[in-house]
Amino acid sequence: MKRILLVILTLCSLGFGLSNSSGLKFLIFNKLKEYTSEKYPEKVYIHTDKPFYTAGEDIWFSAYLLDGVTHLLSAKSSVIHVELLDDQGIIISEQKLFAESVSVQGDFRLPMELKEGSYILRAYTNYMRNQPQDFFFKKEIPVYSLYSDDTDVEKDSKSPENMDLPDIGFYPEGGYLINGLKNKIAVKIKDADVDSSPILGIIEDTDGNKITDFQTFEFGLGFFYLTPEPGKDYRAVISSDDEDILYSLPISLSEGYVMNSSISDKELTISISTNKSEGLKNTLVLGHQRGIPVFDYIEKENKNTLLFKIPKIDLMEGVLDVVLFNDSKNPVAERLVYVKKDDKITISAIKTNGNATTTRDRVNLKIEVKDSVGNMLPSSLSLSITDTQMIKPDENAENIRTYLLLNSDLRGNIKSPNYFFTAGDEIKKNAQLDLIMLTHGWRRFDWQEFLEESLMQKFKPEDGIYFSGNTINSKSPFNNKVSETKLTLRKKGFYQETQKTDKNGHFNYGPFVFNDTINIIFQASNSLTPEHPDFTDTNIVLDAPIEKPGYLSVWTSSPFQQKITKNESYSAKSQNYIFQNFKYEEDRELLEEVTVKGKIKDKEEIEDKKRDKRSRYFAPSYRVVVSDMGMHGANDFMELLTNIPGIRIGRDAKDFTSQGFEINLRGMKPSFYLDDIKVDLAIARTVAQADIDFIDIRNTGHSSGAFTLEAQGVIAIYTKRGKGMQKRKKMPGSVTFQSPGFYNARSFYAPDYSKVDRSRIMRDTRSTLYWNPKINVYRFKETEVTFYTSDEKGTYQIELEGITDKGIPIHTTSYIEVE
């Protein structure tokens, strides 16, 4: 009986353990499904026309907005915020772009007085703010001064402030050092680049006994093996200038788990070991890529080691996160692995109009993206062509492929990431890339928080411009109130929309998509019907603009002026090219002297000219200038019209309230405009005389032709702040203001020498020969671009990058010779 009971208890215990592991697996899978299908992250990548600039130049760019899991067009946001920040985190220029497709173009014009230094190009969506700013797109942009005497002096590398000890980190594989188990430990020098100087060191215990030695290579990376012993601590010793520098290693744990991995051309191998008495029983091993589960395994037996292999064909290219969970549902070891795969996609730019290319010559490029069997792959691309003498190509620089597949899924920033994907020394580069995986962490979510709490979505996706706020009582205690609201804006003419607030007095109009700046007027009242509009009891409070995210200065590398690597050829030519746009060339023809006679305009003429510019075309039938009438009281504009020919003001027979007036213009009912926005008479009457500059009365016919479909005439009121006002103007029951729209990007200019006199135009020394931010490649249609070369002979780099319609990032460079 006891033996039967013991067997039953054992089976129950085993069943409980398996149930725990299985339950955890289903929980993780459900959470990951929610993450990838509903709450997936977004990624933004920006391709600039070149890596550095001179003050006074333009930064041309293409911004890609993608689903962070599939790398397809995001179904959430349509709005991208792009900012240019200085090294203090101050925004010096910003744009709000509307992305109708996978990419949208933009540009920044750098002020000519901009100081030399490093600037940060930052891009994000409002929805991306739900995760740490580590996952915003950030790119360091060096900017050279336009004036040669403004160059900062390079600091002495031997000065005291530059003698800081190297910041070295030690990273045990799997996460922890465990006593009695062999651990692989990666070494990384912080902020080291591909050409960093090597460091030699030894590992010793606290008694001074040497255990092993190590050396760092490119990117300041290295590794060594260590089997910690109980009761001992370990340290690294580096000798510098006859002085030993000591670095403590992480403290080893008495028991735990060690995870090792390796990857070959065909498979991924995962080995796990533990010194715990219960072994690996009921542990769960899970592998996922960007939140998509790719393998899982539950260990059912009480063993201390585990080895399994995953075919590489089952994995995607990119970062793989392998996590070990114990039977208490806690993550106890984690390992990142980069999976390289040959997608066999070729992207090319082929010159189709002859072999030789001369200066100011036409170039036709056929753009192709093909799969392994030669089929065209529909893609969205951007293209930059630059002078390699002025802008030396950097084959290790970041591109859309390295960003989407590597940097955007890692914690921290990897410098020169394309080094790991260029040809040559593949075994060495793969080993170094694996050390990169050991020294970074995929932390889009913390596992404990991810499994126990719902993913917070405080910041909502933006799909346009919204206007929202609340209506409140105009008198104390100023509570929210239910009201009728009306929005009026100019959008291809005038657009009006009405909406009743919710029970809390909240309203929300949108989304709207418009460029530049438009005039907005909100009206609110208990009732907006023409018979009983009463605005005196309602005020409107608009929601404050979304606060911009802070600036993470820790991301910025050393100030640019401490390490000036100025390309003198680029600096000189770019300065000359900018200056020549602001002065005449010496060989231009000198025109004969011309004498122009005129008279000085008095103040009244200047003011009248300003009013004419604000008013619409065609002269008004009659204009009332308030300052000429000496009336600046609190009365409304109707008092100003009492003696105007053709205007009759009287009571509205249908309205017996104090507001019941009507205006007739030559026997008809005119329309009313306030700063070019159509309004009701009741709203027009809320403007005090003291706020009015002038009023245009436009009878029917030619004079009212400036206002479409206003056949009964127009009375147009222009306030003193007028169309140029930026601040909101509040009146009872209404708010007027101007709203900036989405940035309307400029077009890159390059001379078309088929249409200009080649012998007369000034010398052409462009560093960016051609920029095209949006090239669409189709399956059954050829794609070709055309441009003209400049006056500079030499080699030009053609850089193409973008994304296929399957979400595969692609990048290539090629060259063209100008003879």
Image (tube, helix red, strand yellow):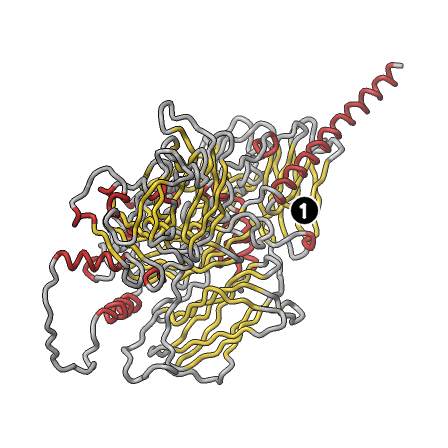
Q: Quadrant of the C terminus?
A: bottom left
* Quadrant for the N terminus in the image: top right
Residue 381: x and y in percent read 51, 64
Say whether residue 406 is left or right of residue 480: right
Q: In this view, does 268 lie to the left or right of 209?
A: right
Instruction: Establish if 104 lies above or below 771.
Output: above
Image mark count: 1
In this view, the residue in front, 590 or 314, is 590
The three-letter amino acid code for the residue at tag 1 is Val
- Asked which secondary structure carries label 1, the reply is strand
Image location (x, y in percent) of residue 66:
54, 52
Q: Which residue is drawn at 62% across and 61% down?
A: 342
Q: Nearer the viewer, residue 313 or 615?
A: 615
**Residue drawn 37% across the image and 47% down it:** 556
| 765, above or below 479, in the image | below
Say which residue label 1 marks: 294
Q: Where is residue 8 in the image (x, y as percent from the top left)?
A: 84, 21
Q: Could one spot residue 607 in this view of the protein?
A: yes
Instruction: Tell me if residue 198 can be seen.
Output: no
Residue positioned most to the right: 1
Residue 221 position in % (x across, y down): 47, 49
Q: Which residue is drawn at 12% across and 78% down?
A: 594
The correct choice, above or below, for 43 with respect to 35 in the image is below
Along the line of sight, the residue nearer the viewer: 271 or 109? 109
> Left or right of 683: which side holds 595?
left
Which image quadrant for residue 30? Answer: top right
Q: Residues within 10 Å of mark 1 (few under 14, many from 20)?
A: some
